[in-house]
Amino acid sequence: MLRARPSVAPAVGIAVLLALVPVLVPRNITLLNLGFLTYLYVAQGVAWNILGGFAGYVSFGYAAFYGLGAYTTALLWLAGWPAVLTYPAAGAVAAAFSLIVGVPTLRLIGPYFSIATIGVGEAMRILTLNLDRITRGASGLNLPTTVPSKGWFYLVALLIAAFSIAVAASIRASHFGLGLLALRMDLEAAEGLGVPTALFKNLAHSVSAFIVGICGGLYATYLQFVHPDTVFGFTQSISLVLIALIGGLGTVWGPVVGGVVFYGVQDYLETRYPTFHLFVYGALLIVILLFEPKGLVGLAGRLGRARPRAPAAGGDPS
């Protein structure tokens, strides 16, 4: 049986209110930058969760898709493409690459898959550093300075975040989503029931990579500079894992909550303790897995169920 679709009215209302921010405070650059970066994290966390949460395949290699998206947009933009047209191309390149690496790696299960994906982002970083005729290697790519306003970036990032949430919610409520849940629970049983597990895993991988690639492309135009160490860094991959875990792995809204919380924590740590932020990420990952594996959404649900209910009118309160 498919999951009942909850009302989308509250989510649409919140999105409309958030979209009014550039209209109401067009000169508040700090707020617009904060919103832009938060929405990018939300979009990527939700996308990662399609494979890592719904299907249970925890990948540490999504920096490869983010970096490919960033470099695709950068190179096409420098070649004369309008920036906005480079974003779908960035997503398509990332999705295509996800199929190339996914066909062999998704045959692995559990920690073997996770370990295999660690090398994907690092391999792309090293490759990009050495393709200096195309990527300018360690010098990075400087992009045109004629970029849209901060309000435009804010709205596009909000749109991508909303798109990723809509995609994840649709998948969760579909037969495809049930198939991903089945293979997460018991791969052999799912195959025995006729679920096309290889197809579903690769499809989830490519859909999530497409969204992450778009985010990488948007970030490249926002920053006006791309460097392999930045977009292919392992920190980028581990951030998406933490976002899903903080909010609630395998839920639609968990990565949304996780993205908002994570960006606040990251901004504080990198400002105050730039040397130790990776250590803190690792410690945070362990604490969540040990004490609250269902994340903040799971914690909120548990507290809600534990709250005593008021007695019915006219009933015996005892």
Image (spheres, grey):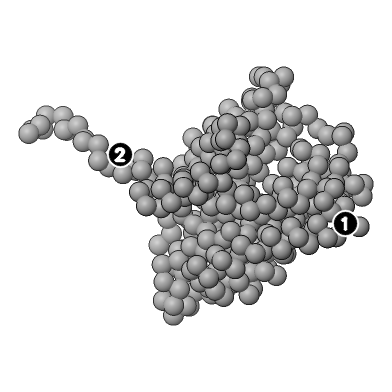
Q: How many marks?
A: 2
Pinpoint residue 144: horizontal percent, then vertical percent.
Answer: 88, 38
Q: Which residue is mark 1?
A: 132
Q: Is residue 189 left or right of residue 15?
A: left
- Of the 4 image quadrants, the one containing the C terminus is top left
**Which residue is at the front of the view, 68 or 204?**
68
Name the residue at 41% across, 76% down.
189
Q: Which numbered disc flags the more N-terminal residue, 1 or 2? A: 1
Q: Secondary structure at mark 1?
A: helix
| Quarter of the image that includes the N terminus | bottom left
Left or right of 241 on screen, residue 82? right
- Where's residue 32, x and y in %? 67, 28
Residue at the farthest front position: 275
Q: Secondary structure at mark 2?
A: helix
Q: Which sits in the foreground, 57 or 119?
A: 119
Name the residue rendered at 74%, 32% in the picture: 152
**Could you say which is closer to the camera, residue 145 or residue 17?**
145
Residue 55 is situated, as x and y percent measured from the top left of the image, at: 50, 63
Mark-to-mark CA distance, 1 and 2: 55 Å
Q: Residue at x 86, y 41 (%)?
A: 143
Q: In the image, which disc is placed on residue 304?
A: 2
From this view, report whether residue 66 is shown above or below residue 31.
Answer: below
- Residue 162 seen: no
Q: Nearer the viewer, mark 1 or mark 2?
A: 1
